[in-house]
Image: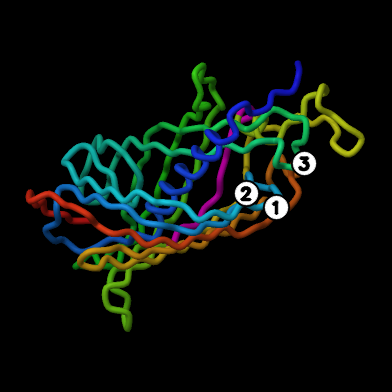
Amino acid sequence: MTPTHSRHPARHHFQRLAACALLLCSAGQAAHAAEEKPLWEAGIGVATVSFPAYRGSDQRHNFLLPTPYFVYRGEFFKADRDGVRAQLFDSDRVELTFSAALSPPASSDDIRARAGMPDLKANFELGPQLNLTLWRTDDRARQLKLLLPLRAAFTLEKQSRSLGWVVHPKLNLDISDLSGFPGWNLGLQVGPLFGDRKQHGYFYGVDTAYATSDRPAYAAGGGFAGMQAIVGVSKRYPKHWLGAFLRYDNLSGARFVDSPLVRTRNYVAAGVAVSWILGESTTRVLIDE
């Protein structure tokens, strides 16, 4: 097998920016008590983000980029702080949704650890997510949930291929209208990540054809993939939205931690964004989050 390199670096650069924009716009939006809101809201903004090329990379990407802002609060289909999803089942304490996620590509030309190896393609994940409400206040301004997503991953290209499975159980605490900071919302998430052999092999495996003196061949196993914690803050003003997130990843104990492609076991990613709401529907819906 011969190494493959990006023939369209500008296109991959745009895909990376678009994926990061979607990530940032969904970060830091906490829950609110029951109230009427527009069925949909749309806008545009700008963000600055800093993140590693992939989990475990010692190289970072820093971007200033445009950010779309879109919220849809349909009875079945939703697009909000929890991502784009279809709500399959809902009860007072248990919610079953169908969710998706998107990850940006990474060109091996720009990553020392992967020099000469195939690029990491943009990829997406699809699967069910079970949300269990463990505790909440009567006005639902404070909520603690256990989120249990199970997703199948695929490359985002003309001939898509499977990248295995990802499981990311996490505790999620949402706090609306912080004491002393009217209108500000806080979201906290923490939990382990797990992936199967195919998922870890795609990101951390090194085939014999790409082995070098300082990058030995490596076969990654499935299982534990480290811990992740995220804190996000946001505030919705009448005509704009302001948000920020800080994410910490620790790969200690991960099944692939000995891969030569893992150059650091812990890192921080962060972003800040401001969006201007350009339009919203006249139709209002009662939101009880």
Residue holding disc 1: 252
Asked if the magenta segment contains residue 189, the reply would be yes
Tell me, yes or no, whether the two marked residues, 3 and 2, touch with CB atoms within 8 Å. Answer: no
Q: Which residues are magenta?
A: 188-198
Residue holding disc 2: 226
Q: Residue at x 33, y 68 (%)?
A: 185
Give the crowd class for mark 2: few <14, some 14-19, many >=20 residues within 10 Å: many
Dot 3 lies on which element? helix
For the stretch drawn in magenta, the main secondary structure is strand
Question: Residue 164's quadrant in the figure?
Answer: top right
Dot 2 lies on which element? strand
Is 268 displayed left or right of 31 in the figure?
right
**Tag 2: residue type?**
Gly
Q: Position of residue 70 (x, y in %)?
A: 28, 48
Tell me, yes or no, whether the two marked residues, 2 and 1, touch with CB atoms within 8 Å. Answer: yes
How far apart marks 1 and 3 lie (CA) works out to 19 Å
Q: Residue at x 57, y 40 (%)?
A: 194
How far apart marks 2 and 1 lie (CA) works out to 6 Å
Is 225 displayed left or right of 49 in the figure?
right
| Quadrant (top left, top right, bottom left, bottom right) of the C terminus | bottom left
Q: Which mark is residue 113?
A: 3
Q: Is residue 201 above or below residue 53?
A: above
